Amino acid sequence: ELIPRLRPGDIAVIDHEDIDEVSAQGLIAARVAAVLNAANSVSGRYPNRGPLMLVEAGIPLVDQFGQEIFDRIADGNTVELRGSDIYAAGRLLGRGVLRDAAGLRAALSEAQEHFQAAIDAFIENTLEHAYKEKGLFGQVHIPALDVAIRGKPVLVVVRGQDYKDDLHVLQEYIREKRPVLIGDDGGADALVEFGYKPH
C-alpha cells in the first residue's frame, strides 16, 4: 500500500477514481506535498468528500493525468509541480487538471442530486452478481485458521471512516477481553500501528 511508504513532503502519485474520505485522511496524515491522480478524483457518480478534504488541508490535487504518468514517474524520482503540469529536470511529464475548493464543492452538490440513482444502480448490480454466483458458495473452500476462535471474542478491524478513532476507543476492551484480532487490508495496518499483532 502506498500511504505507509510516504514521507512528509513527498508527492503522492495515485490511480484512484473518486477519492474517498479514508484515503484522503491517510494522505493528509502522511503530510504529502501534493497528490497527482491518474484518474478522475471526482467523477460525479456519488458525493465523495475526499478531494475537497485534501484541498481544504492545503494539499494541491491534480488529476486526470492518465495511466501514462506511471511510465514517466518512478518511485523516488524528483519532480516539480507547476500549476497543473508536472516536470522532471525541466522536462514536461504530464498535464493534468488542478482542482480547487469552489469547483469541488459544486461537483459535490451536483453529485448529491444523482446519489439516489447511483445507490439504486449499485443495489441492482450487487443483487444481479449475487444471483449469478450463488452456485459458487457451496464450492468455496474455507481454510483452517492458525488460531482457535471458538468461544472467544473476535474483533474484526476494517478500514472505514474514523476507524482509527474507533480502535483507540476499543483499547481498554482489547486489554481486558484479549479478543482474537482480525485485520482486513488497512485494518491490519491500523492494528500494527497501535502495537497489536493481528491473528
Image: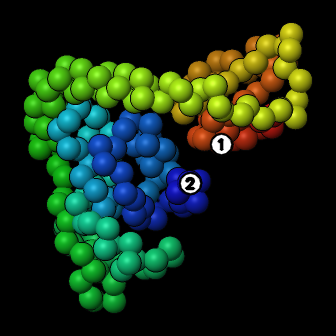
Label 2: few (<14), some or many (≥20) within 10 Å? few
Which residue carries the number 1 mark?
189
Q: Quadrant of residue 86?
A: bottom left
Report the residue at 42% width, 29% height from top: 132
Report the residue at 29% width, 23% height from top: 124
Residue closest to the eye, 142 or 8:
142
Q: Position of residue 59 (x, y in %)?
A: 33, 53
Q: Is residue 56 visible?
A: no
Q: Is residue 146 left or right of residue 118?
A: right
Q: Is residue 183 left or right of residue 32?
A: right
Q: Note whether 117 is above or below 146 in the view shown.
A: above
Q: Note whether 55 is above or below 128 in the view shown.
A: below
Dot placed on the residue nearer the N-terminal end, 2 or 1: 2
Q: Note whether 30 is above or below 156 in the view shown.
A: below
Q: Residue furthest front?
A: 135
Label 1: few (<14), some or many (≥20) within 10 Å? many
Q: Position of residue 51 (x, y in %)?
A: 28, 44
Discs 2, 1 touching: Cβ within 8 Å:
yes
Q: Amino acid at mark 2?
A: Glu
Say which mark, if any, is on residue 1: 2
Q: Quadrant of residue 117?
A: top left
Q: Position of residue 169 (x, y in %)?
A: 64, 18
Residue closest to the eye, 87 or 119:
119
Q: Quadrant of residue 88?
A: bottom left
Q: Amino acid at mark 1?
A: Asp
Q: Note whether 192 is above or below 170 in the view shown.
A: below
Say which mark, if any, is on residue 134: none
- SS type, badge 1: helix
Distance from Cα at disc 2 to Cα at disc 1: 10 Å
